Image (tube, helix red, strand yellow):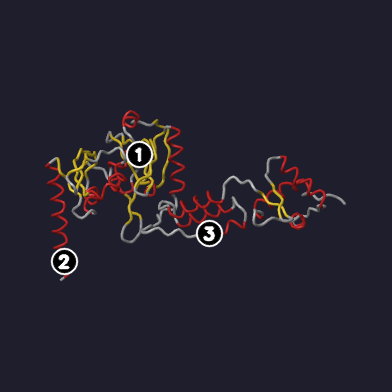
Amino acid sequence: MPKSSNQKLKLLYLQRYLERHSDEKHPVRIQDMQAELARYGISAERKSLYSDVDALRMAGAEILQENGGYYLADRRFELAELKLLVDSVQASRFITKKKSGELIKKLESLTSEGEAGQLERQVHVLNRVKTMNESIYYNVDSLHSAIAGGKQILFRYFDYGVDKEKVYRRGGGDYRVSPLALTWAEENYYLVAYDGEAGELRHYRVDKMSKIRQTEDPVQGQEQFRAEDIARYATRVFGMFRGQERELRLRFSRHLAGQVLDRFGRDVILVPRGEEHFTCTVTVAVSPQFYGWLCGFEGEAVILSPADAAEDFRAYLRRIAASCDAAAADAQ
């Protein structure tokens, strides 16, 4: 019988079939392999398929035989690992809903069709809102390239208006910075960069960047970057809003020790103060976002010193109370 033009692809088709259709619970029989190869115009006798399976084993594929069929036992990712990756993609705020679906489909292709069904699951995360910027996936790639190449970048930066349309800062003008690192904080990707004009490190939300272009100018600010502990950066900059960095002494109710360790890391020293409280000294970028974090503990977290910071916090609370009173009067 003359061989078809696809005969040389026989082993490749056979390997793909085993990858997509076989697993421990779904072994495939020799006649299943014959039917699959016939779809490509390839005829295969049973004896030749036994030899083909042996050839794939010699090439490193762990093909096991069970219940009268064969299945591929070794895979690049175990099913439990793929489930973890799918959950991470589903829960990730910075990946859009559309891109999440595309990534999960690609992850499903790394296992058999029988097991891929177990990856089609919805991860429910409270208060999780996906980003609206579809280009973030490519922004991250562009920024990695600029960081690796040591080149400055130009980009535009925007917020969203009440109509959900982009509102560009600087009237749509370009930002020019030296990209130094990408970091993950407050459930968002941030670029840490050196602003040569301001002479300081700044950060930008990657999903609010657009039209990123790499220049030929070398990056600046490496000395400032080396002096900064990026791993601790997000613990000081609340909500990734900058403010004056200050050393504060704080007092918390004892049951909040876990939240303090989650926020500032396990190196922070907690000093018992009576039976109800503890104190700690931390360095933070003082900002309304930091004050808002303290407010979330409903009076069980306060600033002890320095005195001007404690007074500024009290003034912050008074401004909020006054704003609420004004809003209530306006609603009447």
Mark positioned earlier in the residue sequence (2 or 3): 3
Q: How far from the left and from the top, in percent, is residue 151?
A: 41, 33
Q: Secondary structure at mark 1?
A: strand
The mark found on residue 120 in the picture is 3
Q: Secondary structure at mark 2?
A: helix
Q: Nearer the viewer, mark 1 or mark 3?
A: 3
| Quadrant, the C terminus | bottom left
Q: Which residue is mark 1?
A: 192
Q: How far from the left and from the top, in percent, is residue 201?
A: 30, 36
Q: How far from the left and from the top, in percent, is residue 327?
A: 17, 64
Q: Is residue 273 left or right of residue 237?
A: left
Closer-to-camera residue (27/137):
27
* Outermost top residue: 223
Q: Amino acid at mark 3?
A: Glu
Q: Amino acid at mark 2?
A: Ala
Badge 3: how crowded within 10 Å, few (<14), some, or many (20+)? Answer: some
Residue 46 visible in rendering: yes
Q: Secondary structure at mark 3?
A: loop
| 17, above or below 195, in the image | below
Closer-to-camera residue (115/231):
115
Residue 13 visible in rendering: no
Q: Which residue is mark 2?
A: 328
Q: Is residue 19 left or right of residue 298?
A: right
Give the image quarter of residue 57.
top right
CA gap, disc 2 and disc 3: 47 Å
Q: Amino acid at mark 1?
A: Val
